[in-house]
Amino acid sequence: MLKLIAGKKGSGKTKQLISMVNNAVEVSNGKVVCIEKGPKLTYDINHGARLLDTDSYHITGCDAFYGFLAGIAASDFDVKEIYIDSILKIASENLDEIAKLIEKINALFKDDVNVVITVSADASELPESMKQYVA
């Protein structure tokens, strides 16, 4: 299942994501992965979650990010939760490109993995195809 947490900068999306990650570590029956751009969540995320910094892997663009996620899916079948902070900073600031990426991510993980993504945009600004995922 894929969910988007949408809102303008400073609206509390990352705090909500941190809370969800830490809760998932406690209750999930599989591995929890949190993906960020830059090492800003190191001290906020429970050590039981795998914290990945996309800068460490030189990821730029939607295709590279999708490949990164596909690699996670292919290498570890025990991953049940993936949390992505600031997808606009990681993959692209173009919402239409992000909408296509969201559809690919949803198809990749289907209902096997719970995916939560923060988007720094008001829900009303999102393309129609993304609005169905807004929590």
Image: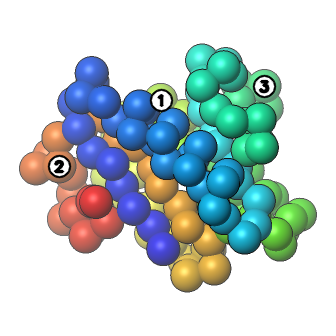
- Give the residue type that dot 1 points to: Lys
Q: Report the Cα–Cα distance between label 2 and label 3.
A: 30 Å
First in sequence: mark 2 or mark 1?
A: 1
Residue 18 on image: x %, y %: 51, 37
Q: Position of residue 107 (x, y in %)?
A: 54, 77
Viewer-nearest of labels 2 and 1? 2
Across and down, in percent, residue 52 comes to 73, 36
Per the rendering, the mark at residue 107 is: none
Q: CA distance from mark 2 to mark 1?
A: 17 Å
First in residue order: circle 1 vs circle 3: 3
Q: Secondary structure at mark 2?
A: helix
**Circle 2 residue:** 123
Residue tagged 3: 56
Q: Which residue is mark 1?
A: 89
Along the horizontal axis of the image, is 77 left or right of 70?
Answer: right
Above or below: residue 23 compared with residue 57: below
Q: As rendered, which of 93 and 116 lies closer to the eye?
A: 116
